[in-house]
Image: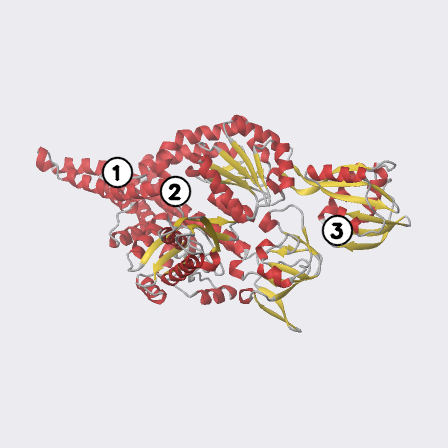
């Protein structure tokens, strides 16, 4: 009798160097197992943090032990056969990245290459055909500098600018961010960075000089200010400055047997000169070089923003080893090390608390609006084995900020495997992935350029067929060449783009180019982060409930007296709320003998009575302090509304409960209504805050769905699911933890003044202020979508150039 059984194996055990499920080796492992007799299906299950390989098999055809052996052997074989090389070069242009890919793809043993204009490069290679050392040598022979990851780490710590490293496996197509930057003046990378007398800004300066020369040439010709020789002289200067870097790239492309737009632009400019249209030719080169330089500048800013993200975690850590405390590099931390974290310091690694209690600001990673209380784990060994399943009150993350308590933390993940490192890799992964439109236009360019050049040659010698003077054929060929140059598109499309972008800008929305503008017109779903986006981003006292026999004034006075000396954000919210509700004369009570009970609340004496202010759990520890049913019901009601609650007890009686909440922005509800009226089908919140809070906020502002308890990688998964279900999806956020989700959305939208540098640079669209209300004006957003629909057919080509 055959029986369908399931075998679940931890993927990190089978493929220890592949932390991401989107990897060639995972696909090969699944396809290999599916081909085995008795195996019905194999797929990935579990969470992103703990993926599992689930195999469905017929126990009558293959035994459990045999299936396990096959899976383990296949995983080991793939790990030995396939390697990955992660590189970082200076930001460049999309054409340079494509040429880089083409040259490296030609190296024997290279299976796959992805290069992004921001400098992120991923190479997958077959170890049976080329070793890692040999691959480094071949890359060097091609003109690409490669530096071992250990050297780049040392260079980074010493302030040097190098950035190429290697990994044995996994993380594909991610990047190692323990080393940032690069030497912008050496080898191939140096050429890409266009270093010159003006450093990294040389290309921009040359483009502006070309523009000035074109303007001077036009002015002299227009008003006959000097002889024609002066006009030509200014035009030649425009040719020199505008074509300087374009010529270099065109030569490299021709050497690589590739005809790119650079080549066509140069030939078109030369054709304009032969027709006596020197100023027009200079204008072509000026526009092209200006586009190049601005693209390079934008890529540089994006790269620096990711570098800043990678540096959120400290470089040094205090480690307790036996009775000795040593200061070591974070990169040298091992799993099981005990690190000491003092008040207001950033955590150096992911881990769990073993000594001390504190509150931690986790906003850089999870986006939570209030600090999370932390306390020691009951079983250190069990916590180390099951770190991913630990409760939030025990886990800490690299890059987050410790509160007022000094604690000791056991390292559970190495520096390169921390949650923050994964955030960096997720952003980098999104950068290396091209859209179908980009792939199409790249193929189109490779056909278009040689086709135009061939047509020009035919027209040039048409006189031999149609019996016309060579001068007439030459003029016609040059005219076609100039008309077919991409600057015909470069002049018309940018003007339309600038009109749409300017209209958005006047409304407080910064749209970064034609591609995002085009995509805004086709959105069907928008995902929002909660903290700082839909909400104010800081806790506020929203509810004051008293029990029978107590007054609001007494409750607030007592709570104010106890909390005014605390630096906890929730305490600050209570103090501010009490001040709003009471006059200064009414606030006369004073607290003494304050005692902080970390994670639960505070105890003090006010007017000779013992006072407790804190969570419901605090009062379970106070003898004879069982809360009455009336208060328990009040507390539950406020928690259901998404509030963080604090009970207040003075002496032998309870006074009431206070509710603190990160309140929705006043305009959030109007914004959601406006977006729905414009045809956005799905409005969803994806937040790191708990589900109860997200449900309450989502309901109050009118969202169609709210998801809570999400880590950055969970947000990425949610965005990808939305793109599968709805197609064109935007992600709106303001924090570091939103950057990967924004990078994976069709359009990433960042809140401006309240947003982080990383989120802003990752975004395609930025709200220049932190006022979500700029979306509420129907005319403003409708105008942007109208411009997008007008530009769609043109920008499908232009956006990839």
Q: State yes or no: discs 2 and 3 in contact (Cβ < 8 Å).
A: no
Q: Residue at x 40, y 52 (%)?
A: 30
Circle nearer the N terminus (1, 3): 1
The quarter of the picture where the C terminus appears is: top left
First of labels 1, 2 by sequence position: 2
**Where does residue 254 sit, x and y in percent of width and height?**
25, 52
Q: Secondary structure at mark 2?
A: loop
- How would you rate the neighbour count of disc 1 (Cα within 10 Å): few for under 14, some for 14-19, many for 20 or more? many
Q: CA distance from mark 2 to mark 3?
A: 50 Å
Percent coordinates x, y for residue 476 in the rendering: 19, 35
Which label was assigned to residue 482? 1
Between disc 2 and disc 3, whose residue precedes?
Answer: 2
Nearer to us in this view, 252 or 445 = 445
- Viewer-proximal residue, 66 or 394? 66
Q: Name the quadrant containing residue 315.
A: bottom right
Residue matched to label 3: 600
């Amino acid at each position: 009798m055959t029986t369908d059984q399931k075998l679940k194996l931890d993927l990190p055990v089978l493929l220890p160097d592949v932390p991401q499920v989107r990897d060639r080796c995972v696909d090969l492992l699944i396809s290999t197992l599916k081909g085995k007799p008795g195996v019905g299906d194999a797929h990935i299950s579990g969470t992103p943090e703990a993926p599992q390989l689930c195999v469905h098999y017929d126990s009558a055809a293959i035994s459990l032990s045999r299936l396990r052996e096959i899976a383990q052997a296949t995983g080991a074989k793939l790990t030995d056969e396939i390697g990955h090389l992660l590189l970082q070069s200076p930001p460049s242009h999309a054409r340079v990245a494509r040429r880089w890919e083409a040259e490296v793809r030609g190296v024997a043993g290279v299976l796959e290459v992805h290069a992004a204009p921001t400098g992120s490069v991923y190479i997958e290679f077959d170890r049976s055909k080329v070793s890692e050392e040999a691959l480094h040598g071949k890359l060097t022979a091609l003109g690409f500098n490669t530096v071992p990851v250990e050297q780049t780490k040392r260079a980074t710590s010493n302030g040097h600018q190098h950035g190429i490293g290697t990994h044995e496996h996994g993380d594909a197509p991610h990047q190692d961010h323990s080393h940032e930057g690069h030497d912008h003046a050496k080898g191939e990378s140096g050429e890409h960075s266009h270093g010159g007398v003006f450093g990294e800004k040389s290309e921009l300066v040359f483009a502006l000089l070309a523009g000035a020369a074109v303007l001077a040439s036009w002015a002299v010709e227009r008003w006959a200010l000097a002889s024609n020789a002066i006009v030509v002289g200014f035009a030649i200067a425009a040719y020199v400055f505008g074509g300087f870097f374009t010529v270099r790239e065109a030569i490299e492309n021709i050497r690589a047997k590739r005809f790119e737009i650079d080549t066509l632009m140069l030939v078109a400019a030369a054709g304009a000169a032969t027709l006596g249209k020197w100023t027009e030719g200079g204008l072509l080169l000026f526009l092209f070089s200006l586009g190049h330089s601005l693209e390079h500048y934008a890529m540089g800013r994006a790269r620096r923003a990711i570098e800043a993200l990678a540096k959120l975690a400290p470089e040094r850590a205090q480690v307790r080893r036996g009775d000795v405390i040593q200061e070591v590099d974070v990169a040298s931390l091992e799993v099981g090390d005990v690190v000491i974290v003092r008040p207001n310091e950033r955590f150096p690694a992911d881990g769990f608390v073993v000594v001390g209690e504190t509150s931690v600001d986790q906003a850089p990673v999870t986006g939570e609006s209030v600090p999370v209380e932390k306390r020691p784990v009951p079983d250190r060994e069990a916590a180390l084995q099951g770190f991913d399943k630990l409760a939030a009150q025990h886990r800490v993350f690299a890059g987050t900020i410790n509160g007022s308590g000094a604690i000791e933390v056991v390292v559970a993940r190495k520096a390169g495997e921390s949650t923050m490192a994964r955030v960096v890799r997720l952003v980098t992964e999104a950068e290396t992935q091209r859209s179908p439109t980009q792939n199409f236009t790249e193929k189109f360019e490779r056909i278009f350029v040689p086709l135009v050049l061939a047509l020009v040659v035919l027209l040039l010698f048409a006189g031999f067929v149609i019996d016309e003077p060579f001068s007439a054929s030459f003029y016609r060929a040059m005219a076609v060449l100039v008309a077919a140059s991409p600057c015909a598109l470069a002049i018309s499309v940018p003007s339309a783009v600038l009109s749409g972008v300017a209209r958005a800008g006047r409304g407080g929305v910064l749209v970064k180019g034609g591609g995002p503008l085009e995509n805004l017109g086709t959105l069907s779903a928008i995902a929002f982060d909660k903290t700082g986006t839909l909400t104010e981003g800081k806790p506020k006292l929203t509810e004051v409930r008293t029990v029978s026999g107590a007054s609001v004034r007494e409750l607030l006075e007592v709570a104010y007296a106890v909390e005014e000396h605390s630096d906890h954000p929730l305490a600050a919210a209570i103090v501010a709320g009490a001040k709003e509700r009471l006059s200064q004369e009414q606030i006369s009570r004073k607290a003494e003998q304050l005692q902080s009970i970390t994670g639960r609340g505070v105890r003090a004496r006010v007017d000779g009575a013992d006072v407790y202010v804190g969570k419901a759990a605090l009062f379970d520890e106070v003898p004879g302090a069982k809360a009455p049913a009336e208060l328990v019901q009040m507390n539950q009601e406020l928690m259901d509304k998404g509030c963080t609650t604090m009970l207040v007890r003075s002496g032998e009686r309870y006074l009431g409960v206070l509710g603190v909440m990160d309140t929705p922005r006043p305009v959030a509800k109007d914004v959601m209504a406006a977006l729905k009226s414009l045809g956005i089908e799905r409005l969803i919140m994806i937040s790191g805050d708990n589900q109860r809070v997200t449900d309450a906020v989502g309901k109050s502002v009118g969202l169609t769905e709210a998801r809570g308890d999400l880590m950055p990688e969970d947000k990425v998964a949610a965005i990808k699911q939305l793109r599968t279900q709805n197609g064109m999806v935007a992600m709106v956020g303001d924090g570091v933890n939103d950057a990967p989700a924004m990078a994976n959305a069709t359009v990433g939208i960042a809140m401006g003044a309240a947003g982080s540098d990383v989120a802003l640079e990752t975004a395609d669209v930025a709200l220049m202020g932190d006022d979500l209300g700029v979306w509420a004006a129907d005319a403003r957003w409708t105008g942007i979508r109208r411009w997008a629909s007008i530009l769609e057919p043109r920008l499908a080509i232009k956006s990839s150039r």
